[in-house]
Image (cartoon, rainbow, N blue to C red):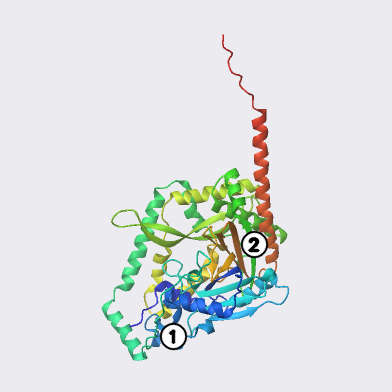
Amino acid sequence: MPSRLTALDASFLFMEDASTPMHAGGVAIFTPPPGGFDHERLVRLIRKRLPFVPRYRMRVRDVPFGLARPVWVDDERFDVTYHVRRSALPKPGSRDQLNELVARLLSRPLDRSRPLWEMYLVEGLADGNFAIVSKSHQALVDGLSAVDIAQVMLDPTEETAVVPGDSWRPRVEPTEVELLSQAFTELATRPATAVEAARDTVTDVSRTAARLGGKAAGMLSAALAVARPPASSPLNVPIGEQRRFATVDLELDDLKRIRKSLGGTVNDAILGVVAGALRAWLMTRGEGVAQGDVIKALLPISIAVPSASSGEPGGSRVSATLVELPVGEPDPAVRLQQISFQLAQLEAGGHFVGADAIVNIAGFGPPTLHALGARVASSLSSKVYNLAITNVPGPQHPLYAAGSRMIAAYPVVPLTKGQALSIGQISYDGGVYFGLYADRDALPDLDILVSCLEESMDELLARCEQSRRTLRVVSDKAPVKKKAQGR
């Protein structure tokens, strides 16, 4: 029988509507090999790598009368050329033209009658490069236990890895009677699913509360940050169906210089850059920015889960934490110190409440109730945080797609209701690449925010130089102790 969608996977389908499509995406820029690169070559590559991602040939099938969550079934009419498409930019093939195309492609919802992914080869970029734009529904890829097609298409060398042959044949779809029979059987044999899900969630939350009670003030302040609603912000407004997309490139070495000079970690430095950019952007809008003002950022993270038997790390789970970005602080070094302190306290606090446990609350009951619960959770998000920021460390060596070297990669993080901006970031091969995804009407000045990010980086680097000069002056002025003269 077909496998049923998990509560988490189904929630992404149920909360989706025209203004909040729940697919994530990415944009990668490539330099073609000497022999060139075309659509046919990309199709051949994807066709060979599909066995590594079997769900990419499956579609979602609803259960009659909504008696159970949907199931995954093989797409009997699967056609890889439908999913791998071709586009091109007019001359001059600028980055702005590419970003506009990406925004339009990612704004469109995926066809639910087919496997929930698409990929576009975009030709005509300046300097002879090309781009690959991918989009996959979050029901298809959860980020930890599943793998994205854009990941398996890449190789660590110019040589395309040889993979086993593909013998896939679609299984016949179940009839409506079979789907109903499976649903009734599950209800009859597992009536305690709802109770177990609720019990697991309560246990997880209770343990976290107990840990908070025994931790220092830093963890307590983190808990209070969740309880306090964020201040009103132009980042939290009703959103429409159309998007804007922009990119920013930074150097990883520059962020390491900031870390070495001003303290913290590279991740702290990245958030420091974002905080400074948001402060400057708010000021360009005439928004009042006073001492103590913050923007609440939701940071999805992966944390190690101890093994029940050994206590050693036994896997990973998705978790999330809130960090208050101090946009009211004018000093970039102090902003960075405040961010570093928050993250250090959260790290010292150990595990957070897992997103998998929280979602399981909505995992039981008919999908109708599940849909309502997911929509309520989505509508409440703006009352908890201002924007989501993802930060993924990537490999620090080149990757290739059929011999084409990837020179940059930008994530696209979907928006939820009341969230007008998301920021995705990945480090790769010495660079740090930001993808800014925004509601088209709410942020017509997204290009200004891009400039503010670049200026915020320059501001922190200037502070590093100032700190270096100060240390050198102090060192030069320090008295030199003379060696004692022997008798």
Residue tagged 2: 248
Residue 408: tell me if it is visible: no
Report crowding for label 1: few under 14, some 14 to 19, many 20 or more residues within 10 A (C-alpha).
many
In which quarter of the view is residue 464 placed? top right
Which disc is residue 187 wearing?
none
Q: Which mark is first along the chain, 1 or 2?
A: 1
Residue 276: tell me if it is visible: yes
- C-beta proximity under 8 Å, tags 2 and 1: no
Task: Name the residue at the front extreme.
Answer: 35
Residue type, label 1: Asp
Asked whether 17 or 289 is in front, the reply is 17
Q: Is residue 299 left or right of residue 186?
A: right
Residue 217 drawn at (x, y percent): 47, 46
Q: Residue at x 28, y 56 (%)?
A: 309
In which quarter of the view is residue 487 placed? top right
Depicted 279 relative to depicted 47: above or below:
above
Residue 189 drawn at (x, y percent): 26, 78
Residue tagged 1: 75
Residue 98 drawn at (x, y percent): 66, 72
Asked whether 333 or 470 is in front, the reply is 470
Mark 2 and mark 1: Cα distance apart in space: 38 Å
Task: Indicate the secondary structure of the residue bearing disc 2.
Answer: strand
In which quarter of the view is residue 235 placed? bottom right
Indicate the quadrant containing the N terminus: top left, top right, bottom left or bottom right.
bottom left
Residue type, label 2: Val
Residue 4 drawn at (x, y percent): 37, 78
Task: Indicate the secondary structure of the residue bearing disc 1.
Answer: loop
